[in-house]
Amino acid sequence: MATDTDYLIIGAGPAGLQLGHHLARAGRDYRLLEAGPTPGTFFRTFPRHRQLISINKRFTGTNDAEFNLRMDWNSILSDGGPLFTDYSKRYFPAADDMVRYLTDYATATDLKISYETRATRVERDDNGFTVTDQHGEPHTARVLVVATGPAKPYIPDIPGIELADGYESVSVDPEVFTDQRVLIIGKGNSAFETADNLVETAAVIHLAGPHSIRMAWQSHYVGHLRAVNNNFLDTYQLKSQNALLDGHILNIARDGDGFVVTVSFSRADEVTKELRYDRVIRATGFRFDHSIFTGSARPALVINDRFPSQSSAWESRNVPDLHFAGTLMQVRDFRKSTSGFIHGFRYCVRALHRILEQRHHGVAWPRVTIGADPATLTDAVLDRVNRTSALWQEFGFLGDVIVLAGDSATHHEEMPVDFVHDAKFAGDADFFVITLEYGPDHDKVDPFDITVRRVAQDNPGRAHDAAYLHPVVRHFRAGALLGVHHVAENLENDWTNEVAHREPLRDFFARQLSALTVG
């Protein structure tokens, strides 16, 4: 059935539902298009081995709902609606639980969703967007938001790659690979997930790729290799016939019932070798499918053409009023923070909604007015950083903004830091940006190496050298940085100590405000 709305969202996964929820609460005219029969079609297939790697920590020692979202990586924001923690007791839950949760969320929030409606063509003219579905029905809107994620397999440019089985379709029955030599192209979580599934049946498993493995526990980027998927590394380092191949795959050729693969090894003086395998599996990730976009509606792409190029408002850089939600948002903090995952993009989607409200409806960013004296500013900052889940999850990317206005100030929560500057949000006024951040070289040091000295916790004099997550307050005026204060790190992330935390921050605010008075 044809539809005409102000906002049209393609995709009813977590991001689409999240944005739909915010639009519904604001009383806006919207519609979601979902290709599948229920929300969360992606999770009906992926991950292939049906275990999520997003943590589901149900017990935290507190009933503070805001704080608990720090440990709940699967729920989307609901203002009292269903939480994923009620759907599974497992720390790493099953993907089928996510499908149940999203279905119940859509029902509980009574969202306007057209199911089994696949977008096949997107056009744009002076009146907005027209999305045609598989039945030929048009859906028109002034603003289009794509929340489908990078759902198309990324296929590297390797001669013979078409001979490989894709992660998206290869059998997940390990018995199919009994006593076989298997090559898996890729070194990410999907590749290791696949390898782990085969260690009990395959004779030999090789994982190949040109880049070094990055461990999530060291980089703090949860898209890097997770410990839950790295059992394969034991089988490699403890000599169980499996191996990591560091290098480029130059060619894949069929050889009787198997394949001959040419590998150029990066760490062996570019030695080239031909290796024989019974099966080759491609597990090289996904990319954004822009094939349905035509003419002036087609967004420019970045990062090996895997993602749409976006502004700090998550808007296409070449197609006005075309925005992106969900995993596609990660372009703005690629492989740094958490915008590619539910526990990160749920806050980015809320920020996107606030941007749309401001731009199209004249609704100001939510704010509270507070005093502009050092004590009040200190209390406001420390009260927030001790509870906020948004700044905790989207470290260094989302921040609170306090804008000074004489003897008072306005406190704005959870703003994309780059948007604050790009949009000149505070004009010429002085403002403070509050973030949670790791130290600049946090990913360069092995956190388990006890010979590496760390800054003592609660040491305000060395807080700027801290590697672990801690609050950072920056003072700006008209884009110029006027001062920075690092709040000392703390083992349990409790920034309430008078000597270590409150007094140094209060002194910082006093100095910055005093300089304004003198000026």
Image (cartoon, helix red, strand yellow):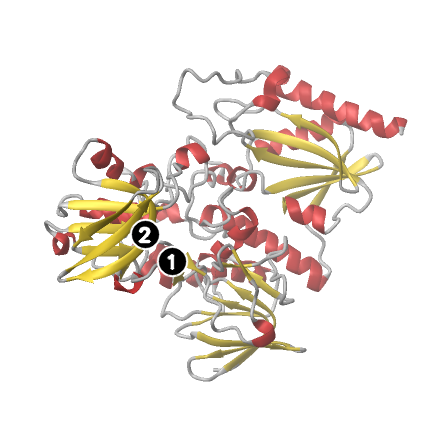
Residue 145 drawn above or below residue 61 = below
Classed neighbour count for the residue bearing mark 2: other residues with Cα under 10 Å, few (<14), some (14–19), many (≥20): many
Q: Residue under label 2, please give it.
A: 249
Inspect this view and state whether residue 60 appears. Answer: yes
Q: Where is residue 32 in the image (x, y as percent from the top left)?
A: 49, 69
Quarter of the figure with residue 294: bottom right
User: Residue at position x 63%, y 53% from top?
Assistant: 312
Q: Where is residue 221 in the image (x, y as percent from the top left)?
A: 45, 40
Report whether 450 appears left or right of 346.
left
Compare residues 503 and 322 and report the one nearer the observer: 322
Instruction: Give the residue type at disc 1.
Output: Pro
Report whether 224 appears left or right of 10.
left
Compare residues 139 and 276 and report the one nearer the observer: 276
The label shown at residue 156 is 1
Instruction: Give the residue type at disc 2.
Output: Ile
Report whether 190 appears left or right of 133.
left
Residue 304 drawn above or below residue 33 = above
Residue 331 drawn above or below residue 119 = above
User: Residue at position x 37%, y 42% from top?
Assistant: 56
Label 2 close to label 1 by CB (< 8 Å): yes
Residue 314 drawn above or below residue 242 = below
Q: Position of residue 290 (x, y in %)?
A: 49, 68
Inspect this view and state whether residue 366 appears. Answer: no
